[in-house]
Image: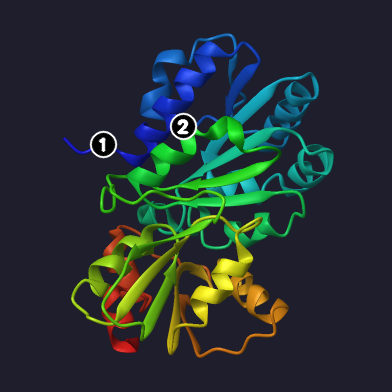
Amino acid sequence: MQKDIRDIFFNNIKKKFLLDKNYYILTNDADVHALRSIKKHDRFIDVGVAEQNLINIASGLCNNKGKSLVYGFCTFLTFRCYEQIKFNLASHNMNCKIVGIGPGYSFPYDGPTHHGIQDLYLMYLIPEMEVINISDNNLSDTISKNFHKIKGPTYIRLEKGSMNYNNKIKYNFSDGFNFVHKSYKKNFLVISSGFLCNLAVEEAKSKKDVDVLNLFKFKNINEKKFIKILKDYKKIIIYDECTLLGGITPIILGYLTKNKLKLNIITLTSPDKQVFKYSLDRYSLLEELKISPKYLRKLI
């Protein structure tokens, strides 16, 4: 039976939580299967639908030599309490990890309130905040097992379902990116992150000149190596489930501008609008928004 990406992550977190008396887990009434067994633990705090208070409590616990992990839906943990995150957590460099479940259109039937298509860049804008986007089971296991090595305030976006497409890759956290598919020729490079990384890999497998790079960390990356890789390709496609200005695109373009590098860049991202569509599966929604693999194939 294939494991859910969230269960892999939170099972590893639960082990650390039970061994460390200074570790707290907090939520805004969100349910995660792997954590149900510790919901009545003294250091597990369900604040309810009160995100601003949630962040304030997490900040207070960190200030008292504690470590806290906050989890809930991406949009609710970012937009509703942005000021609290920016000042109460980030400005003090609190050792708090915010785990956003439901990135992109992973909950398409709940509409725009649950669509995580702008939260990535929103959190990136906070100077002290590291941002990590987990796209597959392998990366989920790697990040959660090395959680203690990530210092300071961090926002982690966590997919759902089984995404076991690249379990042989050894992710290099220091680099912040890894090739998840390599071909015979260096003609096209698809840079993606999160769920669409899976779709990009499947599309690239049918080609002989398309490589796929998973950009999973957005600050403190190996910038020199990243720029060197990009220089090798004739065409680069940024493939992102977030909007053009809400996801990885402005981050990548920022690195290029900083290094005075002009490349042939094409973007395939969500349209900049609120999507009032319900009762659709994720793939149908991607098709309707013209960012499904079919449209990636056309660009290649």
Residue 246 seen from this side: no
Disc 1 on helix, strand or loop? Answer: loop
Residue 64 vs residue 50, the one in the foreground: 64
Q: Residue at left 56%, top 67%?
A: 225
Name the image quarter holding residue 44.
top right
Which colouring convention does the figure follow? Answer: rainbow
Image position, residue 14 (x, y; %): 46, 21
Amino acid type at image mark 1: Lys
Residue 296, quarter of picture: bottom left
Please give left or right for residue 223 compared with residue 235 in the image: right
Q: Earlier in the sequence, mark 1 or mark 2?
A: 1
Q: Position of residue 146 (x, y in %)?
A: 51, 34
* Looking at the image, residue 21 lies above or below residue 105: above
In this rendering, the answer to whether 24 lies above or below 183 is above
Residue sitting at x 72%, y 60% = 125
* Left or right, 26 with reference to 16: right
The residue type indicated by label 2 comes to Lys
- The number of discs equals 2
Q: Which residue is mark 2?
A: 145
Quadrant including the C terminus: bottom left
Residue 6 in picture, x, y percent from top left: 38, 37
Mark 1 or 2, closer to the camera: 2
Q: Quadrant of the N terminus?
A: top left
Identify the residue shown where x is 70% and y is 32%: 95
Compared to residue 221, the image places residue 88 above or below, namely above
Q: Position of residue 214 (x, y in %)?
A: 43, 62
Indicate the secondary structure of the residue bearing disc 2: helix
Numbered label attached to residue 273: none
Q: Which residue is denoted by mark 1 in the rendering?
A: 3
Q: Residues within 10 Å of mark 2 (few under 14, many from 20)?
A: some
The answer to whether residue 25 of the structure is visible from this angle is yes
The residue shown at (48%, 50%) is 172
